[in-house]
Image (cartoon, rainbow, N blue to C red):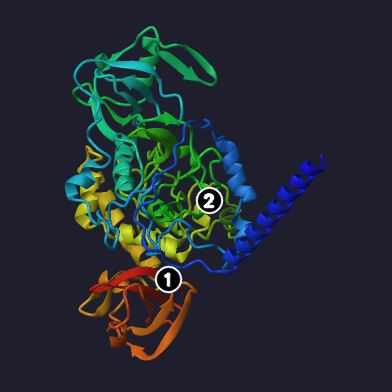
Amino acid sequence: MVQVWRRIRQRLAEFRQLLLIGAMLAAELAASPAPKFYNDDPLWSEPKPLPVSTAAKREIVEQYEFLQNTFKEPYRREHREGAIPRAQNANTLDEVPDCSWYTNRFGTPGSVPHQRMLLADLVRGPGNANQPSMDGVWTVLSNKYTGVTSGFIILDSTGKKFILKLDPVSNPDMTTAVDVIGSRFFYALGYNVPENHIVNFTRDQLRLTAKSRHKGDGHERRMTQSDVNDILAETRRDREGRYRAMASFYVPGEIIGPFRYNGTRSDDPNDVVPHENRRELRGLYVFAAWLNHTDAKSSNTLDSLVEDNGLRYIKHYLVDFGAILGSGTLRPKNPADGHVNMFNIKPATVQFATLGLNVPPWDRATYRDIREAGRFEAASFDPGNWKPNYPNVAFDLRRPDDDFWGATRVMAFTDADIRAVVDTGEYSDPRARDWIANALIARRDKIGRAFFSELLPLNNFRVSGGRIAFDDLAVQYGFAPARSYQIQWSRFDNGAGRKERLPGAAGPAIPARFQDLPAGSYFSADIMSDDPHKTVTVYLRKINGGFEVMGIDRNW
């Protein structure tokens, strides 16, 4: 027994020693700052996701979400002005790596595979591989029982599943067109979206079976021909007797409900960055403002458990763009949409106090009498003060660098790009196409002018001819006159994160003394123009045969 206790005491002593060594190592690691840059920076793609075998299906009660975001304001009080962290998933070049949320496709500066999409790719959007077959009948599985638009859930003759959404009688083409246009724009901007297509079908194409169901208000029953007729009566037919619809191909994978704009999913090991701190969700504000996506909320998103080469993981989608541009889905947008939240007492108070004499800008806006276009214009658009229907946590926590990131992508769309995407809405009245395209062009320019002024809008950094070069986007797009820049060079200690300013090393030319340093050495250039508070620090790394841009820090 004595020998047994002796061995136990020896093992305990060894265990305490291991704990002590572990504590010392942890303290040493904590005291040693992590390097600013690693060998694989800048990352343009997140690591391969961890496998997800199962995930809980969840629903979001829209009324609760509205009340929570409007009155409780989650997270906003925790991030006071000046304390909002930088987007936590941005790479060292302040860009978003490809991941299950986002893919760089259009307007991304720097050395990434997709800097511009061809016009044909913009028009194609998420794809044309899954258009509904117009040969044969469509089997009606049920009525469209979620959302506010009327329609059906169908299987085409090839067995593909679609949601059919119809236009209101009062505004033909309006809702179906914007849903297709939105899918093209948001796809180009980097998001996962469903394939949306304009279709024209006849009543004879719809077939009911014994399994066709009519759902709604918590009740379910067998669907009848009268149900089909009642739904079709809510839209109009063209001269050939066809009905127009937007056919949305079902998102692939196992649908597990929407995502939130704050927090993370506890059952997703890859979901480690709080959603309110994701650059692509903060920057989504800029795109939503441009396209007047006032319905940017959790219930218009989807998480899907997908499988790719045997790996299962959760992919995140934006869905339902029927309330963008001038469409309020069932009717044209209210003139106040995009200017105030649904619950906002201040405008009502001002109106009451001034006896209605203080008319807000949006009520003075001019709209063309075009039913297909709804209410959409650019004159009253104020990019920095645009509002969704109710507060969005990620939008509220955005910073000037998030706005800048979004604005670079919006400004990448040329007039021809915008007109080509608007054409995919297949408006019957060409006046609607022209009005919307012109408004988007004007709103694009307002976004660039507003958000490029919040900081020093330098981008696309590169080394050329032994000099550091960059683009001033405000100057490039004509929002600011040509200006001069002051550049100060420093030696950068990557391990300690310290800069050592080099006296006399100024200007765009890389100092000659850097040429003789070994590969792997780091340098930085602090760039300033007319406002000393707005600076950009660019980090370079010496490589064999030259230098490479490693990172960017923006200050304002």
Q: Is residue 484 above or below residue 62?
A: below
Residue type at mark 1: give it.
Asp
- Residue 472 seen in this snapshot: no
Give the secondary structure at mark 2.
Answer: loop
Q: Tell me which corner region of the image, top left, top right, bottom left or bottom right, holds residue 128.
A: top left
10 Å neighbourhood of mark 2: few (<14), some, or many (≥20)? some
Image coords of residue 294 (percent x, y): 44, 47
* Residue that numbered label 2 is attached to: 274
The residue shown at (43%, 86%) is 501
Which one is in front, 345 or 86? Answer: 86
Horizontal side, residue 363 vs residue 22: left or right: left
Near-viewer residue (449 or 343): 449
Q: Residue 526's quadrant in the figure?
A: bottom left
Pointer 1 residue: 553
Residue 153 at x, y percent in the picture: 37, 22
Residue 96 as seen in the image, left or right of residue 356? left
Callout 1: SS: strand
